[in-house]
Amino acid sequence: MSLSHNIPSYFHIKVDRESCKKCKRCTTHCSYGALSFNGERIVADDSKCVACQRCVVMCPGSAIRIVKNESFLPPHGNYTRRIRNILWAQSGNGGVLLSATGNDRPIRTIFDDLLLDACQVTNPSIDPLRETIETKIFFGRKPKKLEFLTDKKDSTKITLKTEFMPNFEIDMPIMIGHMSLGSISYNTCMAIYQASKELNILAGSGEGGLHPDFYEYGSNIITEIASGRFGVDINYLHKAAGIEIKIGQGAKPGHGGHLPGEKVNSLISQTRMIPKGSDALSPYPHHDVYSIEDLAQLIAALKEATRYKVPIGVKIAAVHNSAPIAVGIVRGGADFLTIDGFRGGTGAAPRIIRDHAGIPIELAIAAVDERLRQENLRDEITLVAGGSIRYSADLIKIIALGADVAMCCMPVLIAMGCRVCQQCFRGLCSWGIATQQEYLVKRLDIDVARNRIINLFHSWNEELKEVLGAMGIDSVESLRSNRDRLRYIGPNPKIAEILGVKHAGE
Amino acid sequence: MKWKNYTCLPKQFRNERIFDGCGISGYINIDGTKDNGKKIIDMLCILNERENGLGAGFAAYGIYPKYKDYYALHFLFDNEQSKERVLNYLEDIGYLIQSEPIPTKTPMDVSNSPIIWRAFYEPRQKKGISSDEQVVQLVMEINEKFEGAFIMSSGKNMGVFKGNGWSHEIAEYYKIIDYKAYMWLAHSRFPTNTPGWWGGAHPFNLLNTSVVHNGEITSYGTNMRYLESFGYKCTLFTDTEVIAYLIDLLCRKHGIPIPIASIALAPPLFDEIEQMDKKYQIALKSIRATYRSAMLNGPFSIVVGFANPVPTLFGLTDRKKLRPLVAGISEDENTLFLSSEEASFKRLIIDSNGLYTFKKIWHLKSGTAIIARLDEGLIREGFEEPFKNIKLTVTGI
Amino acid sequence: MNNTEKEGAFKLEEKNIIEINAAPNNKPLNYKVLNEKIHEAIKNNHKKIILKDVCGQRFIGASLQGDLEIIINGLPGNDLGIFMDGPKIMVNGNCEDHAGNTMNDGTIIIHGNAGDVVGLSARGGKIYIKKDVGYRIGIHIKEYESKYPIIIIGGTAKDFLGEYMAGGLILVLGLKFCLDGTVIESDQPICGNLLGTGIHRGKIILRTEKDFTAKLGVGAKIFEISEAEKNEIEPFIKEFCDIFNIPYDIISKKPFKVIKPISKRPFGGNYCGQII
Ligand code: SF4
Ligand code: SF4
């Protein structure tokens, strides 16, 4: 790339010479090589800065500030800076642009247009601190009805004929989404699994296999069968609380996966069960699933393989016709169904797909929940919603729209230190999260990270209880699909119609 | 004075949740002796602090022995045309055994009144669909699609009488005193947000199930959408409608015995379940998980009359006991009374100059059903463990 | 399972053999019932299970482990031996799609044809198919440490042979089995289009003198076979010929061609990580 085609940097690193102690700590902490010491002072290369804030936090003299690059491009409301940058990058490289985390386009978030109801007069609110409010849920398939047989002669003799299907009880309607060892570090995985066990919630393994060190947390882990089948063996199937067939992911619907060989160190090799240094390619589709009946077959195969002991589910990305697809999946025998919205995160995805494919989770869940009801299938399955559940408010709203469980990843990473710099795919995460480099991974203290996750979800659950209490509901089951308790204040009545939510004031 | 709002609410109030506070009462004579309406009227009218003149009603079981094999349809009609349309339609799809006005006494100061009608009806046999189911669909259809018509009740050998007004007015209007029933339910209303309308008064009925209810369920949306997936149409926007349909679904469609259905409506807390034996844990968790959308949340107390297969009176309050329900059993142990307030029982004692006495009066435990069956007597007293007196077997363990 | 274990292996005694009728009273059992019977037999310490009249039942041998032998008379359904980890399955006849799906270890021997997507994502074990196979055979098979999946096809294969291949060995012999028991060269092309497309490890070896450059998929390249490779495959071919009664001398009548990846990173240059 010639100099004249350099892309103007977003950030500017300001090092205050007065307060700089010249300890050079920042130069070692910056994993992107933006800072160096020239013998006299710290020199900053703005073009390399990703604003991950590591140097700022680590500087003992508080000498560093990352500011927005003031030199700005000629303004244009249509050819925004973003679009110009994309064009420059593509014309310089010729490849597909990569990105990480979730869709960052400023598209209006429907969650923010939803308001919650609370009790006044006609029914009392409940004090969650002093009275019981239940947030436990059953994860798995339920029968449509229970069959009780009453003895013809003695009406007190009652037999429950229906055998209950495998369900996993979790204490909060929360699941930490699938992030594989490979996309995130060993320490990050360990912190997540330990926290999940402690909280008795679920965590996804991602598609990279399950390292033997994590087996002891298996009772809170849903392992994932993706098209690459990496690390899938008997242990992977038998040590898990449930198994999820990954068809798609919100950040990259219709796209496979690709872990470059240089990230396949001995740890990853051991987990994925592939030789060190070889690429881990996940084919775009599952090659034993070309249709809905093939999916039913894979579900049945997994049930056979696990002797019908754990729930088997399917994850799809929220796309235009999610609702009929969901019906097919449930009919195909899935015990749970995960829908991942278009804002869902990723460690690496083509920017074009991350930014433009899929639909918002709010609409997808509303449509899927409604459609499953029309087919009288909704109550049989557990519906998991992910794709940017950012905080407890989103959790509450998605449950009221129809989900059983909210799934999230970014909040967990942010709780551990992630600054959302969107560079995960480069494997240089300065916070030790999205990286495999030993010296960076070490930066993430497992105990600290675990406790922060525990605190985070404890707080979410308490806030959920506060809201349930204010609504006069003492069990989260009675919030699910209770759209009556939501109102819409956004600009588009069509959205309210699809959500099945009345406008505020109605 | 003019009466209005018989078969629907004024337009501006439709599609709106209806909240109200209420008084509820009910009783059953276990040996099947029939009483006239005096007791139930007294029990209800004493609760007049709980009503504001915007709705009351009665359900009576055993009142039509002559036509006991036919569905007794109780109608409200706005006018002759709507009556003709409905009756013609009934003749098209089934047999009208008898069709006649229900005797009423319009108060002096009222210049108009609805047409109150009853028809004893039998649907024509259809393959693959029971006559019960046909009648359910008929009720849904008429109440949703026929202008100026409303079916108040559709059970056999029973009927619901209800309307806008104070409980004593409604009792007089329908001449409740003249009916003879072994089981009575009654309800008076305190609607907070709507003018009240005749069809929307309680008891709410479907087939033989009648519900009177006090409180406001906070799980309405969840319950309603659950019922919709089983084909119920919640057109009245009231909690009582939802409760009646849930009971119909659990007891009639899914065939769940009422003591167990009551657990689905108000299940024990998980913390309590964890303390129980494995067998009960499995049963209770199965119920909670399978019927998680049928669980009623928020404050409620209900009294339900039920006649399928055995006539049963059933009472239940919410898990947190936010609405009252008191039970009393007569000295001869033949009559079980339920009411919002003990005053209803006291009234009976006073009326009889102390001749009528109660063996026991007690408050129910929250979320625990009280159940009395014709001939069998009191089978649950409302404070038992979930499976007390039930010999439960769970397949697979 | 390695060889030392095999030598010390359990000697089969009569009482360890059981026959299960998959179609009692001429009514084929549901796959769940049949597989439950197999599990029961294993629980009762049976080491050799003979299935009679199998008719499309799926998932036979799913995730079974250890020293077991299953002989299938009839037609097993899809996903034969899925997730299997050790046992040996022999089919007297054809089998349907996805045999050896995500297999970790073990042996599947098919005395007939097999359907599509055989050995999907298998990490180890052997799949020997006497006759012809369908599309996407050996797709995304891998290898890891001592695990090295081997798929040998006596007949011919169709398109996408060895797609996404990430390790292991696929060998196609291109033979035809006449009804009278003689073995001749097949008149069908030995493979279809997009041969080895996306291959990034492992090798596909075809017994043919033809040049298949035009059929190659993305990232695949044809090489002449090396001495080392010849030596590597020899024992497997001998084993294959033994099992299926193929006169070994016919094999040498045609040369072998090897298809291997151009590079370990077939798609490395496709992506760009510029900060936007
Ligand atoms: S870390 Fe701060 S004090 Fe140390 S060299 Fe860098 S800027 Fe100076
Ligand atoms: S995980 Fe690391 S690389 Fe990824 S966005 Fe967060 S801070 Fe950046």
Image (tube, rainbow, N blue to C red):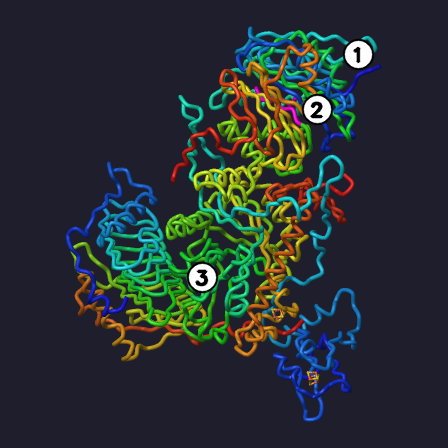
User: Magenta stretch?
Assistant: B203-213
Q: Quadrant of ligand 1?
A: bottom right
- Give how far across and how far down residue A261 sits, in percent: 48, 74
- Where does label 3 land, which residue? A216
Is B205 inside the magenta-drawn segment?
Answer: yes
Secondary structure of the residue carrying numbered label 2: strand
Q: CA distance from mark 2 to mark 3?
A: 56 Å
Q: Is residue B135 visible?
A: yes
Checking the image for residue B23, the label placed there is: 2
Q: Is residue A294 above or below residue C183?
A: above
- Give how far across and how far down residue A45 sits, in percent: 69, 83
Q: Are marks 1 and 2 in contact (CB under 8 Å)?
A: no
Quadrant of the frame with the C terminus of chain B: top left
**Left or right of residue B138: residue A121:** right
Q: Nearer the viewer, residue A235 or C106?
A: A235
- Where does label 1 land, which residue? B112
User: Label 3 is placed on what type of residue?
Assistant: Glu
User: Label 1 is placed on what type of residue?
Assistant: Asn
Task: Using the image, name the chain to which the residue with label 3 belongs.
Answer: A
Q: CA distance from mark 3 to mark 1?
A: 77 Å
Quadrant of the frame with the N terminus of chain B: top right
User: Label 2 is placed on what type of residue?
Assistant: Gly
| Label 1 in the same subunit as label 2 | yes
